[in-house]
Image (cartoon, rainbow, N blue to C red):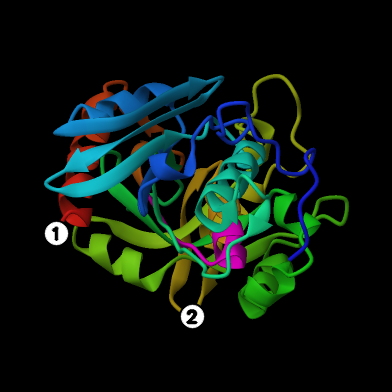
Amino acid sequence: MPLLAEPDLIINADGSVYHLCMRPENLADTVIVVGDPQRVHEISDHFTGKDHSASNREFISHTGYYKGKRITALSTGIGTDNCDIVMHELDALANFDLKTRIQKPVHRSLSIIRIGTSGSIQPDVPVNSFGLSTHAVGLDNLLHFYKDTPLIIDKEMTEAFAAHAAWPKDLSKPYFIKGSDRLIDKFRSFAVAGITATAPGFYGPQGRFLRLPLSDPQMLSKLQSFRYNGNRIVNFEMETSALYGLGALMGHEMVTICALIANRATGDYNPDHKLVVKDLIKLVLNTISQ
């Protein structure tokens, strides 16, 4: 692979990647990503030791040990655009020589677990349960910028959903991408498995109406009623399609598990959801350290 130009892979003066401010030796093979930067501290508080800490904008990273396993905790901020930054810079840390800007001959695959908060859209999936993303349906546009995306999406499920939802022609086409079977199986015992819808915004794209009318007021009900080979869409959030898609293209294993702190179908919401997230963090740490 040719040498990457400096503007394509920007390296800081200390040898760290541009946004994450991490050097290759700072990165563990197992990475927990969270949207909220404060949540990184909640994870690393469980570490018995830390050998890395960095902070830049919304990107905070801590690397340390939990029950002898080295783990990196990293915040992405909100949205698929931020995940595009995070995934590329994690991959650069894992698979490029940052001094020469040349790809390494042996691929390093990361195990990346997203811990998030989300809202259920199914009335039988209660608040305070955990949602496990077997697939993501991207309602965003990010993956369409990458040439090989058609190779990693589930075309049949994508076409079935587009037909079911009578998908508007002025919106980018949705796409379905599967997570890592190995990682998904680790969390099945305590989570509700299903498809996660990833939206490019929190309000209109997730069917919330405050003052601005929605272009498709029935979109939420279309998501709720979609079924394909026993699969259904369980929850809404804003990151997983980018993580699953870029992870598949780059050769990293991905899984998302979310605390379901609201239910859009029933109108329920847990204002004290931070306790549920803390419980989920402990479950994830114990599960991946086994």
Residue 212 in magenta stretch: no
Crowding near the residue tagged with mark 1, few <14, some 14–19, many ≥20 C-alpha atoms within 10 Å: few
Q: Magenta segment range?
A: 245-257
Estimate the x, y position of residue 179 in percent, counting from the top left. 46, 65
Q: Residue at x 53, y 48 (%)?
A: 93
Left-right relation of 105 to 45:
right
Q: Is residue 98 above or below residue 212?
A: below
In primary-sequence order, the first of circles 2 and 1 is 2
Q: Amino acid at mark 2?
A: Asn
Q: Nearer the viewer, mark 2 or mark 1?
A: 1
Identify the secondary structure beneath mark 1: loop
Residue beneath label 1, please? Answer: 290
Q: Which mark is residue 229?
A: 2
Q: Amino acid at mark 1?
A: Gln
Crowding near the residue tagged with mark 2, few <14, some 14–19, many ≥20 C-alpha atoms within 10 Å: few
Considering the image in quadrants, where does the C terminus appear? bottom left
Estimate the x, y position of residue 130 in percent, counting from the top left. 29, 48
> Gap between marks 2 and 1, in whole Å?
32 Å
Q: Is residue 283 above or below residue 166?
A: above
